[in-house]
Image (cartoon, grey):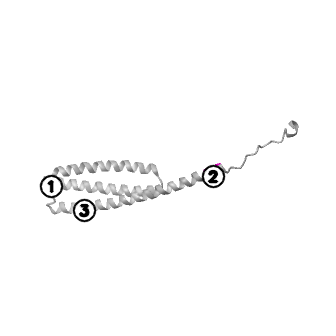
Amino acid sequence: MTTIQTSIDLLNEKLQILEAITANTEQQRRLLKRNSLPGVTRLLREREQLIRQLAAVVRQLSSENIAASSPALSLLHRTILTKQQELLASANLLRAETSYEKQQLARQLNAVKTKRRIQRHYEPVRTLVYSGRRLNIKG
């Protein structure tokens, strides 16, 4: 009975970590739209820690070797599977949005570079500015 209870506790912990990763992913999407790169890097560090915690929980669960025999375990397994699918869909959406933002930034950078190149190439000839004091004297 204690192994089933520890399995339930581990599955609940796994579910909480998955929910935290999902919230982290949604926050990354919001910050990406605002081009807040320091915030995104902070969230990526937090996400890495959450994934490490999730890996530790999965290792503990695999060492338990408990089948989904009880109804509570099967319900938790189904809940975790749906949460994982939601997380995967959210991560795929984030990846697509990141790719789009990268393309937009590349276009903007290319436009700025092209504009600077044109301005440098067709710059008008600079004339010397005389103050007018000694023009007639040196003549």
For marks 2 and 1 on the same chain, the one whose residue lies earlier in the sequence? 1
| Other residues around mark 2 within 10 Å, as few (<14) / some (14–19) / many (≥20) | few
Expressed as whole percent of the image width and height from the top left, the position of residue 115 reads 61, 53
In the rendered image, residue 101 lying in the magenta stretch gets the answer: no
| Tag 2 and tag 1, C-beta contact below 8 Å | no
Residue shown at the point (21%, 53%) measured from the top left = 10
* Magenta extent: 115-120
Secondary structure of the residue carrying tag 1 is loop
Quarter of the image with the C terminus in it:
top right
Crowding at label 1, few (<14), some or many (≥20) Cα neighbours within 10 Å? few
Q: Residue 34, percent across and down?
A: 48, 56
Q: CA distance from mark 2 to mark 3?
A: 58 Å
Magenta span: chief secondary structure: helix
Give the percent coordinates (x, y) of residue 42: 40, 48
Which residue position holds label 3?
79
- The residue tagged 2 is 118
**Type of residue at label 1?**
Ile
Residue ID for mark 1: 66
